[in-house]
Image: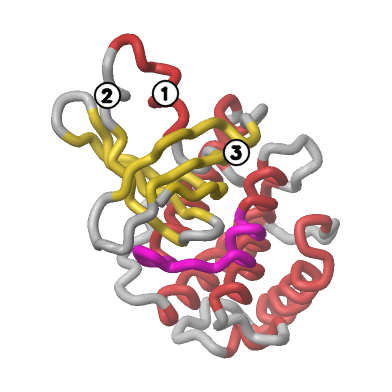
Amino acid sequence: MLKKTQGIVLGAIRYKETSIIVKIFTRELGLKSYLVNGVRTQGNKSKIALYQPLTLLELVVYDKDTAGLQRISEAQVHRAHQLIPFDFTRTGIALFITEVISKSIYENYQNESLFDFLKECIIHLDSKEVHLAQFPLVFLIEKASYLGFAPREALGFLSESRSQPFSVSELTQAENYLAALMSSSFSNEAKIGKILRQKLLDHLLDFYSQHLDNPGNWKSLVILRQLNG
């Protein structure tokens, strides 16, 4: 059966000589793996570009009840990125949030509210007005609510974790900053020192690791450290 849906590309791997298997988080159908034939040929560079991480797509797909790879009938860009591919910091953050998404959901997982949130995050990351330094923190805080394990108050993010990297004075600053982020989201104007912000990021990732099955190491964190001071 053919179905229309929007999708967020999470990644692709090579398959045989000219094909790829691409993971796409779709709005109506959930996380799916699709076999796309013939996109790795010399004349199909524009088609392979459709399947770069975090590309927002309009899709017509074959939806079968049987397990295994699905196929795409039609794919076109929903909204082309203007800044993410050309800005190293935005690219680093994009890699980071792609990894967080990929480790947080599983095959066939479907959540329209989460999809809408992720779509807005990607569009915001691609805008000129975004505060890049705090983007990963806000992303982790808000995404946790869509996954069902976000505390109601800032202190919960700090107390419901096995790691406590903060001094007494840092703990107060961290709580106040998290409360500001929870209150004003991506539009927050509060400032915090680089070292404490990095500690908060490590702490939130540890918080995520406690709630996810086998997340492993966060590989994109090294790149994020270098780009997002």
How far apart in space, not on screen, are marks 3 and 2 (Cα)? 30 Å
Q: What amino acid type should be assigned to the residue bearing mark 3?
A: Arg
- Secondary structure category for the residue under label 2: loop
How far apart in space, not on screen, are marks 3 and 1 (Cα)? 23 Å
Instruction: Tell me which segment is drawn in magenta.
Output: 105-118
Q: Residue 207 at x, y = what percent?
A: 49, 77
How far apart in space, not on screen, are marks 2 and 1 (Cα)? 9 Å
Q: Is residue 114 magenta?
A: yes
Q: Nearer the viewer, mark 3 or mark 2?
A: 2
Identify the residue position indicated by label 1 in the image: 47
Seen in the picture, residue 57 relative to 219 is either above or below; the reply is above
Between disc 2 and disc 1, whose residue precedes? Answer: 2
Between disc 3 and disc 2, whose residue precedes? Answer: 2
- Secondary structure category for the residue under label 1: helix
Identify the residue position indicated by label 3 in the image: 90
Identify the residue position indicated by label 2 in the image: 38
Q: What amino acid type should be assigned to the residue bearing mark 2?
A: Gly
Between disc 3 and disc 1, whose residue precedes? Answer: 1
Q: Residues within 10 Å of mark 2 (few under 14, many from 20)?
A: some
Q: Is residue 166 visible?
A: yes
Q: Which mark is residue 225?
A: none
Q: Are marks 2 and 1 in contact (CB under 8 Å)?
A: yes
Q: Is residue 141 magenta?
A: no
Q: What amino acid type should be assigned to the residue bearing mark 1?
A: Lys
Q: Name the residue nearer the viewer: 214 or 63.
A: 63
Q: Residues within 10 Å of mark 3 (few under 14, many from 20)?
A: many
- Name the residue located 39 percent from the left edge and 40 percent from the top edge: 72
Q: Residue 63 at x, y = what percent?
A: 38, 54
